[in-house]
Amino acid sequence: MNILEIKNVTKKFGDFIAVDNMSLTVAEGEIFGFLGTNGAGKSTTINMIAGLLRANAGEIKILGKNISKHSHFAKKNIGIVPQDIAIYEDLTAYENVKFFAGLYGLRGSQLHERVEEALKFVGLSDKHKSYPKGFSGGMKRRLNIACAIAHRPKLIIMDEPTVGIDPQSRNYILNSVKKLNEMGCTIIYTSHYMEEVEEICSRIAIIDHGKIIAEGTKEQLKAIITNTKDVWIEIKPMETIDLNKIQSISGVKAVQMEENLIKVSSDISVNNLNTIIQCLINDKVEIRSLKEQSPNLETVFLTLTGRSLRDH
Amino acid sequence: MQDVMWLVRHTLKKTFSNKKNILLYFGTPLIGIIISLFVYSGSNEKNVHIGVVNNDPHYITNDTIHFIKGLEHLSVTNIKKSEIDDQITSGKLDCVLVFHQGFSKSVEQGRPGHLQIVSIHGAEITGFVKSYLYHYINNISALGKIANGDERTFWQMYERYQQSPFRTSVHPLKDTSKNIGMTYQTIGYLLMIMLFSAGSLAEMIVREKENRTYFRLLSAPINGNKYILSNIIVNMIVMTGQIMITLVMMDQVFHIKTNIAFWQMAAILMLFSLVAIGIAFITVAFANSSASAGAMQNLIVVPTCMLSGCFWPADIMPTFVQKIANFLPQRWALDALLKLQQGHSFGSLYLNLLIILAFALIFFLVSAYKFGRNNNVNNFV
Ligand SMILES: Nc1ncnc2c1ncn2[C@@H]1O[C@H](COP(=O)(O)OP(=O)(O)OP(=O)(O)O)[C@@H](O)[C@H]1O
Ligand SMILES: [Mg+2]
């Protein structure tokens, strides 16, 4: 059964089209990745699923039921982890989770158990009497998640749950996502971090300018670019180079700079390595090493959108 | 409704777990009482001079006049009908009671009439005389109704009534003018506190949007209307508390005699609390941050309270200010209280009550309209 169906959904803010005729289905039991650059329309889509924004056109169904007609049903089955942390600073961790879980009708000892369970799940059991004021960014993110799962929703939507946190908290969160999935939850996971999505998601949609430009399993997505080869060129740090020059070399599909690493994706049938190196030498760039790389999701994204996933 | 109550409990707990807020919401109304005690301490009381014209010599009339004489701070002189105009215009008398022939008969029959009150002062003088006098007469005419024309029965009951100890309950008239001033001052101040309280409670809506918890609330099975309703309920609970504390403290601790029945006073103030919520919602609907909502409330509350006479009697202000005050809800609430003190019946105040209600309604409609528009452009995300 499809837990989520989005059919031809469009959302406009004034004249600006944030989500453009999008269609998408997520089956029960998946961890579905939502990849896109800043402003691609991920949060807007999520807000529509959560019933916070109304679509201008199209239809969204949760477990086969239209969310505008069955909003209560839809909301009960969804847990949203918002991109911006939404907790009360003047309530303890326990009180925060308890309050939000109570909105779903839980009361008494059942409520208490679920709250403890959720806090334990995100590793905040020992902090349940503490106020979030003193929490680290990672702890706040984890509390933000606990508030969304205590009512045991079937579908959990996480909007960039790992933004700006320490690696330890991030690993904790990624493991919890896997565990939640094993327990039977379907998860929609939004991120800027390709490695995360590649690690945990069973299926991925790449979204750009409000449109889904590719969708499938990691393998399916990578297959889109079997005609691509990647070369990583390590150069002397702090060098400035003109990427446009490389971009204009015949056969080059995408080029990207990450610290002192130039990543060039080219058509597999074109032999342009000489030209690329020549170009760098002409610019007096010092080359340290050269490596052929098998394509990853980053390459897929780059080739499809012409832009790096993370522009910050 | 259960989810609304969950929100109400949450908001109350969150607000009052901070002990400072308890003091802020329930301590400040008492400051009004303290201020009024200072303002009116030692102010000397004025005697009211009353003339009596007795054209109906009968034991009922005589007892009635005797009753008036027994009230404190009233000096009563017998005069002739022809002297009325002279005495009143010269200011020697504040008011004259004329008992026309047939007065005692009408009372005995249970349909009191043939009584006239002449005064050039406003109701602030005659009001008290009237309210006590009517109370007395009504009691006796009630006996008349029970006796149903049987003169002997009436007389027996009348005798007993005259001797009954609870007749002495007229004594509270003592200190009235001082008490009236203190009541006015306290309630005027309370209105301002209510406006501010409603303002800061409603401000939570904006703050909730600012810290994004509103997002989470609405993604739970709660809609915006229920959330607003919960805020209204919290407002009502807090303001009811403030009203009760003020009224009980006035009565039990400070012994200020308001001269108004407790429930009537409470009813008018409760009605006004709707206005306070309405005003608060307007500031919240038009403000785009909690800081600007707060600033807007300061700009609205203090000046309107001054204009409408919350801090001093309206009639000491220039007439054009008084006219402006007619467009302010506080004026109508205070006016209703003054009228009640002067002995008007609660039912006769329907105009005041309707106007206060209309203010509340208009404020609610305007803010609802604005809230609706805000949500259309999705400002909350
Ligand atoms: N309430 C709004 N009013 C006007 N424009 C909006 C509103 N919300 C979002 N947008 C615009 O819609 C586009 C999509 O925004 P959205 O938040 O969905 O992007 P996103 O994919 O979540 O990006 P990010 O990775 O930065 O979170 C952006 O260009 C944004 O400026
Ligand atoms: Mg986003």
Image: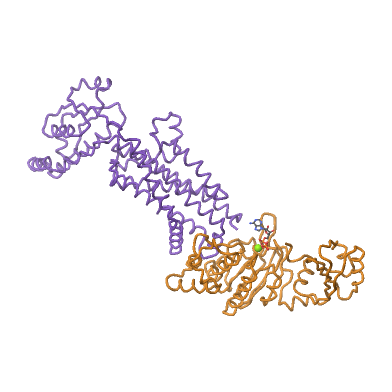
Chain colours: A orange, B purple
In front here: A235 or A76?
A235
- The residue sitting at 60% across, 56% down in the picture is B378
Locate residue B166, reporting x and y percent.
16, 43
Query: In the picture provided, is A41 more to the left or to the right than B367?
Result: right
Q: Residue furthest left?
A: B152
Locate residue B9, reporting x and y percent.
43, 61
Query: In the picture provided, is B170 more to the left or to the right than A267?
Result: left
Locate residue A156, reporting x and y percent.
59, 71
In front here: A211 or B381?
B381
Q: Quadrant of residue A288?
A: bottom right
Q: Quadrant of the C terminus of chain B?
A: bottom right
Q: Quadrant of the N terminus of chain B?
A: bottom left
Q: Quadrant of ligand 1?
A: bottom right
- The residue sitting at 84% across, 68% down in the picture is A235
Relative to A154, residue A241 above or below: above
Q: Residue furthest bottom?
A: A182
Q: Quadrant of residue A204?
A: bottom right
Query: In the picture provided, is A105 more to the left or to the right than A135?
Result: left
Q: How many discs appear?
A: 0
Q: Quadrant of residue B211?
A: bottom right
Locate residue A213, reporting x and y percent.
74, 69
In front here: B116 or A214?
A214
Relative to B203, residue A23 above or below: below
